[in-house]
Image (spheres, grey):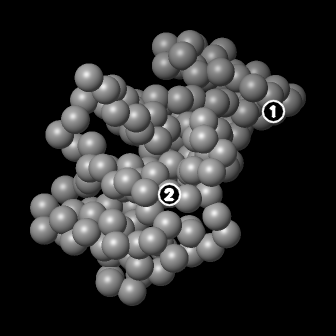
Amino acid sequence: MRHTIIASVENKFGVLARIAGMFSGRGFNIDNLNVGPTMNPSMSRMTIVVRGDDKVLEQVTRQLEKLVDVIDVKDIRDEEHVDRELVLLRLRAGSETRAEIIQICEIFRAKIVDVQPAKLIVELTGAEDKIAQFLELMEPFGIEDLIRTGKVALARGK
């Protein structure tokens, strides 16, 4: 089972290294890690996706809460939340396939952000399953390269 944890941390040198060290030192694997600034310049927000049962989640959460630079830890599995991922991919797109690629991009609301004579760079944001379906459809055209941000998530609030 995959768990999404959101941690608010102090925006200081070495915080990411200490958190990554805590995970590796205890044998927890990080499926996905995304760190970014918040509206408060002294804080950053980490979205961490880990794989394991409830016991693993509880251990990870407790260990994170013990770290000095961690302000707040929240498992959002049971909360209403919005999560998204961004992917950029470079595709082979000759004249014989370009129209079909553009049509699929329109269906998925993907944006073509760069056009070359035989290549396209496409941007897509959405839930992980949407991204996976899109990539599956793009595979036959020839994905030359891609980069994914990993999941970012935000609780909806009450």
In the picture, the quarter occupied by the C terminus is top left
Query: Which residue sits furthest bottom?
Result: 25
Left or right side of 112 for 141: left
Q: Is mark 2 in CB contact (under 8 Å) with mark 1? A: no
Give the amino acid type for the residue marked by disc 2 in the picture.
Val
Left or right side of 97 for 81: left
The residue that appears at 38% across and 49% down in the rendered structure is 6
- Give the percent coordinates (x, y) of residue 17: 57, 75
For label 1, the residue is: 118
The residue that appears at 58% across and 22% down in the rendered structure is 110
- Give the percent coordinates (x, y) of residue 18: 51, 76
For label 2, the residue is: 9
- Give the percent coordinates (x, y) of residue 85: 49, 38
Q: Nearer the viewer, residue 138 or 25?
A: 25
Q: Nearer the viewer, residue 153 or 68?
A: 68
Query: Which residue sits furthest right?
Result: 117
The residue that appears at 67% across and 69% down in the rendered structure is 13
- Would residue 79 be seen by someone viewing this image from the given angle? yes
Image label count: 2
Q: Residues within 10 Å of mark 1 (few under 14, many from 20)?
A: few
- Cα separation, mark 2 vs mark 1, equals 44 Å
